[in-house]
Amino acid sequence: MRIAVLVVALTALAGCGVDGEPIRPSMNTNIGVGSHGVHTSTSVGASVGNVSVGVGVGL
């Protein structure tokens, strides 16, 4: 039980940024309609300070 409480407390501490800058998640979805039909794209990412990592998918 103590280990579970410790893990939850450390997770909350890391999430609020007390131990450094928090990780900021992002998500973007675009839907476009043109002469060639409907085009959709989605991207997700995370950033910490000046470093960003993202993954995108277009259909």
Image (spheres, grey):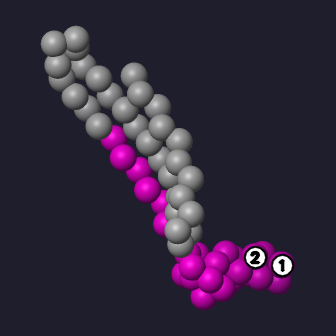
Residue 45 image position (x, y, % from top left): 50, 52
Q: Residue furthest top?
A: 36
Locate residue 42: give its quadrant. top left
Residue 19 image position (x, y, % from top left): 66, 85
Q: Is residue 39 above or below residue 8?
A: above
- Could you say whether the residue bearing mark 1 is in a helix, strand or loop? helix
- Could you say whether the residue bearing mark 2 is in a helix, strand or loop? helix
Q: Is residue 28 left or right of residue 18?
A: left
Give the Cα separation between the discs numbered 1 and 2.
6 Å
Q: Is residue 23 above or below residue 21?
A: above
Q: Residue furthest front?
A: 50
Residue 55 image position (x, y, % from top left): 53, 42
Q: Report if residue 18 lies within the magenta region.
A: yes
- Say which residue label 2 marks: 7
Quarter of the image containing the N terminus? bottom right
The label shown at residue 43 is: none
- Say which residue label 1 marks: 3
Q: Report if residue 3 lies within the magenta region.
A: yes
Q: Which residues are magenta?
A: 1-29
Total labels: the figure holds: 2
Q: Are marks 1 and 2 in contact (CB under 8 Å)?
A: yes
